[in-house]
Image (cartoon, helix red, strand yellow):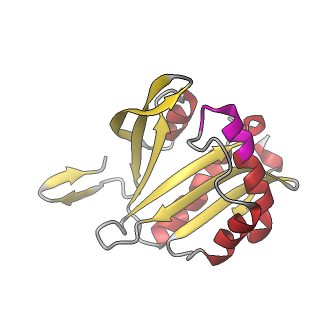
């Protein structure tokens, strides 16, 4: 399914498609934190037009005119965090398992290396076994858990913190080995 999908940087014209994708996945109630749109289409277009590409990048998968995947990455802005970037992924139900995450992640990793980012971080619901497995296949490891961080359908759900060091040897900091 991902063969006919074009993956590339998001542009302001993608704002409506990003809003529709977020609304679609939010309505499922189990894969992303928002349960409604956070930005209007105009606000999303402004974010896309005004973001600093050295610190904030968004890639989308477009199946024809429809946005079916988004990978957003935000680099740490403070000197103590500039070696890290946090990413978030949203994939339309119709396109899950089609390799779009991997294609967007490759673009994000190339961007991160160009920005001297050493570590990519993300969080995922503990109940999202499919996403956790996909992240592990792409080199992410679980670094921690925030117990009962979310309430979903009346039940408490843990948030799993995952990370991937872009330099396979990781780094030695504060006298300890970090990374893989």
| Placement of 87 over or under 81, stated as above or below | above
| Placement of 96 over or under 5, stated as above or below | above
Label count reads: 0
As drawn, is 142 to the left or to the right of 22?
A: left
As drawn, is 30 to the left or to the right of 77?
A: right
Q: Where is residue 35 in the image (x, y as percent from the top left)?
A: 63, 41
Q: Position of residue 106 (x, y in %)?
A: 58, 56
**Which residue range is magenta in the image?**
23-31
Which of these two is toward me, 102 or 72?
72
Q: Where is residue 25 in the image (x, y as percent from the top left)?
A: 69, 40
The quadrant holding residue 107 is bottom right
Q: Which residue lies furthest to the front in this view?
A: 154
Q: Residue furthest right?
A: 64
Q: Is residue 157 visible?
A: yes
Identity of the residue drawn at 59% across and 74% down: 51
Q: Main secondary structure of the magenta part?
A: helix
Is 26 included in the stretch rendered in magenta? yes
Q: Position of residue 151 (x, y in %)?
A: 49, 30
Q: Which residue lies furthest to the left in this view?
A: 175
Is 65 included in the stretch rendered in magenta? no
Identity of the residue drawn at 60% across and 31% down: 30
The quadrant holding residue 141 is top left
The quadrant holding residue 78 is bottom left
Q: Can residue 6 be seen in this view?
A: no
């Amino acid at each position: 399914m991902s063969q006919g999908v074009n993956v590339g940087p998001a542009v302001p014209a993608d704002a409506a498609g990003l809003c529709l994708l977020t609304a679609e996945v939010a309505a499922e109630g189990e894969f992303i934190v928002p349960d409604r749109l956070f930005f209007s289409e105009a606000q999303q277009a402004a974010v896309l037009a005004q973001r600093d590409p050295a610190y904030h990048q968004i890639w989308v998968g477009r199946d024809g005119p429809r946005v079916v995947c988004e990978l957003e990455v935000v680099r740490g802005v403070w000197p103590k965090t500039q070696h890290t970037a946090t990413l978030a992924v949203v994939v339309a139900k119709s396109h899950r398992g089609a390799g779009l995450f991997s294609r967007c992640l490759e673009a994000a990793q190339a961007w991160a290396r160009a920005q001297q980012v050493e570590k990519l971080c993300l969080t995922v619901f503990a109940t999202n076994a499919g996403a956790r497995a996909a992240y592990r296949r792409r080199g992410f490891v679980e670094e921690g858990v925030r117990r009962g961080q979310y309430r979903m359908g009346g039940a408490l759900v843990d948030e799993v913190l995952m990370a991937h060091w872009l330099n396979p040897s990781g780094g030695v900091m504060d006298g300890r080995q970090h990374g893989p």
